Amino acid sequence: ETGVTQTPRHLVMGMTNKKSLKCEQHLGHNAMYWYKQSAKKPLELMFVYSLEERVENNSVPSRFSPECPNSSHLFLHLHTLQPEDSALYLCASSQEGGGRGLPANTGELFFGEGSRLTVL
Amino acid sequence: AQTVTQSQPEMSVQEAETVTLSCTYDTSESDYYLFWYKQPPSRQMILVIRQEAYKQQNATENRFSVNFQKAAKSFSLKISDSQLGDAAMYFCAYRRTWGGGADGLTFGKGTHLIIQP
């Protein structure tokens, strides 16, 4: 496996279900991200784990819960979602320069193919 | 907060012709990166080209080049000799240089590029 892989590619769930999205990066990067992509809207940054520090995004509802057990794996736990949460969820990774106060490396994010989520 | 604006929801070009996609952004930072990403129907976002704000020279990658106007906060993408495989959504993105990854990328809404055979 190379790059950033996401599973599952497609997920259909009811509003009362609990499911998880998984992301794995094989690039040796030290930062991982969750983005939400909805039609006709810019990609929305949901969560960042950078240099072992989680960055909260206060606008993300608590029904989305991230988990980053190590620098290679990232999960997005989903529970009691709403139909408006249906979207493409993209995972990305990057190599950061070493902490706040230091510049980003190339700045580039590497993306997975996404998980298409449908909430019924 | 930084914002990225792509004013063209859709563009169409004949195969082998040249097309330019527009992007403007707003920031108070002086050091930052700008990117163009491509998202084909397969959904994976792929980096097309990258520009560092401190560099005055416009970035080029084969048939892809940018026109970076820092004072105007403009960052357009020119695709020369368009090919059928260039058909995709194109996203302009911004990222400040200093931040340790906490900001991620800020994206525009995208431009859907259609290539006419």
Image (cartoon, coloured by chain):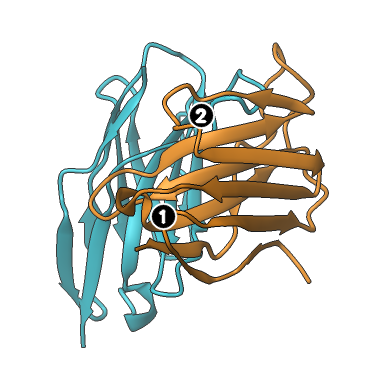
> Mark 1 touching mark 2, by CB under 8 A?
no
Front position in the image: B29 or A43: A43
Above or below, A109 relative to A89: above
Q: In which quarter of the image is residue A116?
A: bottom left
> What residue do we see at 61% from left, 19% from top?
B99
Query: Which residue corresponds to mark 2?
Result: B55
**What is the number of the mark on residue A15?**
1
Q: Colour of chain B?
A: cyan
Label 2 residue SS: loop
Above or below, A7 relative to A56: below
Please state the horizontal and vertical placement of residue A3, each as a whole percent of the image: 71, 62
Left or right for A82, reference B97: left
> What residue do we see at 34% from left, 79% from top?
B83
Q: What residue type is labelled 1?
A: Met
Could you tell me which quadrant the C terminus of chain B lies in?
bottom left
The crowd level at tag 2 (other Cα within 10 Å; few <14, some 14-19, many 20+) is few
